[in-house]
Amino acid sequence: MLVSRNEYIMKKGIYLDNAATTRIDERVLEAMLPYFSTHYGNASSLHSYGAIVKETMDNSRQKLASFLNAQRDEIYFTSGGTEANNLAVKGVAIANSSKGNHIIVSAIEHDCILNACKWLETQGFYVSYLPVDHDGLVDLVSLKQLINPKTILVSVMYANNEIGTIEPITEIGKICHEHNVLFHTDACQSFGKIPIDIVKDNIDLLTLNAHKIYGPKGVGALYIRKGVAITPLLHGGGQEGGIRSSTENIPGIIGFVKAAELCIDEMEKESRRQKLLRDRITDFLFEKFDDVYINGHTEQRLPGHLSFSFHGMEGETIRLLLLLDDMGIAVSAGSACSSNDKSNNVSHVLQAIGRNPFEARGAIRISLGRYTSIYEIEELLNSLLITVFQLNSIFS
């Protein structure tokens, strides 16, 4: 008997798109629940209901800061990574405009950084786009050459969301500080997966969010080094030290920090496990397919991240994704956010690493997570054997 698509997906239910979002950990949900029903006060209220959640929020802020080697009052909670990135880029640009109007960002930044920079260009700022090599690593020589007396900010993501390449953050930060330029990094994809130390890495501003680390959607944070001038985007009641006005999302903050704590505690073991699973997929691809190639650095990448394409069949990527989806396996064709742009499905990241426009339409991204099992990986590999040979190469 035929079953519906939803029934089939639920039956197999193999989720391999953890770079887009993760399933909330039950331990995180459990930590959040009392702050919906019992401890529901407003942290700005002076009575006991408010005082209880204010103390809990401050303790959470301290804990999150400790994971980064930061101080408690350098952490500002936001609604997520997009808001934190906008606050970092726009806020620093506006606050420091008297010092200069030049910003440098990498060519492979998340859309929220690139679009924030496009807006700043309409406000009198000029932006340089730092090139990357074929592995997605930024060109440090070009960075030194691009910095000039008007440069006020450099923003380079810690690890890329599409290809998983981990950037030489420590070296970038060192160059910035040698030239008295502020350095921001978007660490949404890397936090909780690899160690981050804002002091060692010479970082002035750093973006985090919860839903990439088995926490709730709609909450994130921006680390701002003490002394960095920044202009708020939101004006209101003066919450978050006046940097981010709005009633704090207490359940979200509790869940965010609990998720971060679990990731930090389990990072070493989980990174090893995910790397073994990722390597199993990579070995299989090269063993079974002659025309496969990897996008991004083969070693200097996030442990559970793999982006690959089939030469000549890049135009069939969406069909492959849908075939796998019909088999109950969820993977991604690039980043989740870029799929909202219906006018252009060419990846700016793949073009930046040297892929032509046809190739830049054709990457499959597999991102593993805490709940990914070896059984699921073997199911994926068996399904790839079935589906890939249903595709049509332009060279056939």
Image: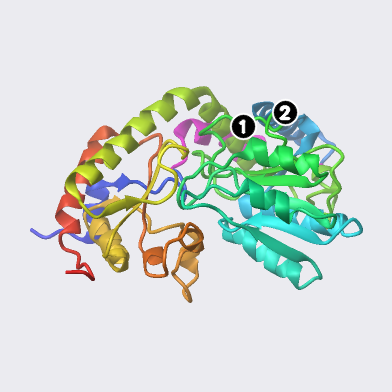
Q: On the image, numbered disc 2 is attached to which residue?
A: 62
Residue 43 appears anywhere in the view: no
- Tell me the quarter of the image containing the C terminus: bottom left
Give the mark nearest the N terminus, 2 or 1: 2
- Quadrant in the picture for residue 70: top right
Q: Farthest residue in the right direction?
A: 98
Left or right placement of residue 376 versus residue 352 in this view: left
Which sits in the foreground, 22 or 222? 222
Stretch of the chain drawn in magenta = 23-44
In contact (CB < 8 Å): disc 2 and disc 1: no
The image shows residue 228, relative to residue 330, as above or below, that is above
Label 1, residues with CA under 10 Å away: few <14, some 14-19, many ≥20: some
Q: CA distance from mark 2 to mark 1?
A: 16 Å
Q: Is residue 73 above or below residue 222?
A: above
Give the quarter of the figure containing the N terminus. Answer: bottom left
Q: Is residue 109 magenta?
A: no
Q: Residue at the location (86% across, 58% down)?
A: 100
- Image spot of residue 299 (x, y percent): 42, 37
Please give the label number shown on residue 196: 1
For the residue marked with disc 2, what is the amino acid? Gln
What residue type is disc 1 on?
Ile
Residue 156, given in percent of the width and then of the height, sits at 64, 49
Camera-side residue of 392 and 31:
392
Residue located 53% across and 41% down the image: 166
Color theme of the render:
rainbow
244 left or right of 137?
right
